[in-house]
């Protein structure tokens, strides 16, 4: 059984990889098409398509200023929007929905209140600020990401929940939520499925 504990401090690249691994799980509803795409002037960590055919720009911050990440997310949306039609013609098997807004998922360990406020001032579903937490599991870091609720365009179909915690076997470490630094929302990841 994998052990939950503390490992060596992860590099920025290890954090980015473990967050992307988490987003590639089927329960997220995302299919990562390509990683490390050069946008207008900066890297987009990944480009995905969701289960509704919407293109999603994924940008991951590893602990620095996340206001800049929001700006990069908006720029990535604009850059990708100009290319969806061409991509849909070149690869019709991707089933990209042309004419729908590109979404941006920006992920960080935590967000400044101004960054969240700025993202929330945009039309719903265009930019989602997702916090992630990493845990050392066995011999590597794993990430837990709270996926967003569906936007108004997708209200009829509930968003898939992250299944990371449900994939883990139950165990007792003797550590409390306080010892682990878990919030009530993060604690739910470790409770048995609904």
Image (cartoon, grey):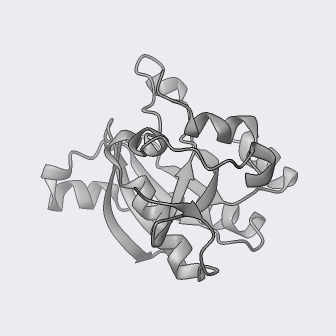
* Residue drawn at (37%, 71%) of the image: 35
Q: Nearer the viewer, residue 13 or 182?
A: 182
Q: Please provide percent x and percent y for residue 163.
A: 43, 40
| In the image, residue 135 above or below residue 62 | above
The reply to whether residue 79 is in sight is no
- Number of labelled discs? 0
* Residue drawn at (86%, 50%) of the image: 113
Q: Please provide percent x and percent y for residue 81.
A: 43, 56
Q: Please provide percent x and percent y for residue 156.
A: 42, 16
The reply to whether residue 175 is in sight is yes
Give the side of residue 64 with respect to residue 32, left or right: right
* Residue drawn at (55%, 51%) of the image: 144
Q: Nearer the viewer, residue 78 or 162?
A: 162
Q: Nearer the viewer, residue 172 or 30?
A: 172
Q: Please provide percent x and percent y for residue 105.
A: 55, 53
* Quadrant occupied by the N terminus: bottom left
Give the side of residue 62 with respect to residue 92, left or right: right
Where residue 42 sits, quadrant-wise, is bottom right
* Residue drawn at (69%, 42%) of the image: 122
Where residue 26 sits, quadrant-wise, is top left
Q: Residue furthest top?
A: 156
Q: Nearer the viewer, residue 33 or 1?
A: 1
Where residue 88 sits, quadrant-wise, is bottom left
């Amino acid at each position: 059984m994998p052990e939950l504990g503390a490992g060596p401090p992860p590099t920025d690249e290890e954090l980015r990889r473990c967050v992307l691994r988490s987003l590639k799980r089927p329960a997220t509803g995302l299919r990562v098409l390509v990683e490390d795409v050069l946008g207008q002037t900066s890297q987009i960590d990944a480009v995905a398509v969701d289960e509704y055919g919407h293109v999603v720009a994924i940008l991951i911050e590893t602990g620095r200023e996340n206001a800049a990440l929001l700006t990069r997310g908006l720029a990535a949306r604009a850059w990708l929007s100009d290319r969806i039609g061409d991509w849909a013609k070149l690869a019709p098997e991707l089933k990209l929905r042309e004419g729908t807004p590109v979404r941006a998922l920006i992920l960080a360990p935590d967000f400044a209140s101004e960054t969240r406020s700025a993202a929330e001032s945009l039309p719903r579903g265009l930019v989602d600020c997702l916090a992630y937490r990493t845990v050392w599991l066995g011999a590597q870091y794993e990430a837990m990401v709270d996926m967003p609720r569906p936007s108004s365009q997708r209200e009829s179909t509930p968003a898939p929940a992250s299944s990371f915690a449900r994939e883990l076997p139950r165990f007792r470490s003797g550590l409390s939520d306080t010892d682990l630094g878990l919030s009530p929302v993060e604690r739910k990841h470790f409770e048995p499925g609904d």
